[in-house]
Amino acid sequence: QSDGTKKDFVTASQFKDALDVRNYYLYTPLSRNNYLFGMAIFTKFPIVKQGTITFKEAKTNHAMYVDIKINGDTVRVYNVHFQSIHFGAEDYLFAQQATDNTDLSNDKWKENSIRILRKIKTGFAKRSVQVDTIVEHIKSSPYKAIVCGDFNDTPWSYSYKQIHNLLDDAFIGSGKGFGHSMIINSLLSFRIDYIFHDKSFRSYGFTTGNTHASDHFPVYTYLDINKK
């Protein structure tokens, strides 16, 4: 809870006003310099239930959900943030040098490659456990689900496939192009942010935004929750 003086609630209120919505749910487990960091879901529809899902041994990765009433139906909406790879400045510099064909020594190539592969392996292992937790939660839900968030993984990953086995990918349903939501060094681009929905819903107008509020681009879609 907050008395309203915390700066995260000021930001949340600004979002609420900008989006012209009445209802939102915040989960802010991290604090730094009087700021609270976390996740949020904003909605114009009434929230009848809300909750958080924590992942073991994860400090900055979590999931949350709300059950919202839409014209008499109840839909469960998840916001997820799976394990990051935690690339640092030296990793991005190496990626830039590699794409620029910079002349690096064999030892430098080996050192950087091993470090990056180790981070990728660790991230993959942790995400696998996290996505299994979400899959079980979705399966136990009494309502049809929408899953949104930063998967930190590509459409060829285990994380993506496990969710896609249950739900439809809105980008596949109505997106165009490659749908890249993150670009590194203006050269490497990835689709790692997703909107999944119950197979009985229909997606249309999927769009990837071009705002630069973070290192990710926002993704949007419209959903018709009536039968296809």
Image (cartoon, rainbow, N blue to C red):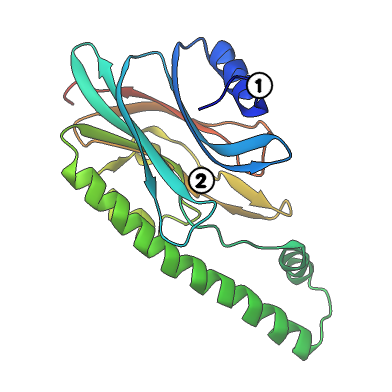
Specify the amino acid type for callout 2. Answer: Phe
- In the picture as drawn, the residue positioned furthest to the right comes out as 103
Does the image show residue 78?
Answer: no
The picture quadrant where one finds residue 34 is: top right
| Foreground disc of the pair 2, 1 | 1
From the image, tell me which residue sits under label 1: 5
Label at residue 178: 2
Q: Distance between the residues labelled 2 and 1?
A: 42 Å
In this rendered view, identify the residue nearer to me: 121 or 41: 41
Please state if 57 lies on the left or on the right of 128 as rendered: right
Please state if 113 lies on the left or on the right of 48 as rendered: right
Q: Quadrant of the C terminus?
A: top left
Residue count near mark 2 (Cα–Cα under 10 Å), binned few <14, some 14–19, many ≥20: few
Q: Where is residue 126 in the image (x, y as percent from the top left)?
A: 43, 65
Label at residue 160: none
The kind of secondary structure element at disc 1 is loop
Query: Residue at image x 54%, y 51%?
Result: 60
The kind of secondary structure element at disc 2 is loop
Specify the amino acid type for callout 1. Answer: Thr
Query: Residue at image x 26%, y 51%?
Result: 135
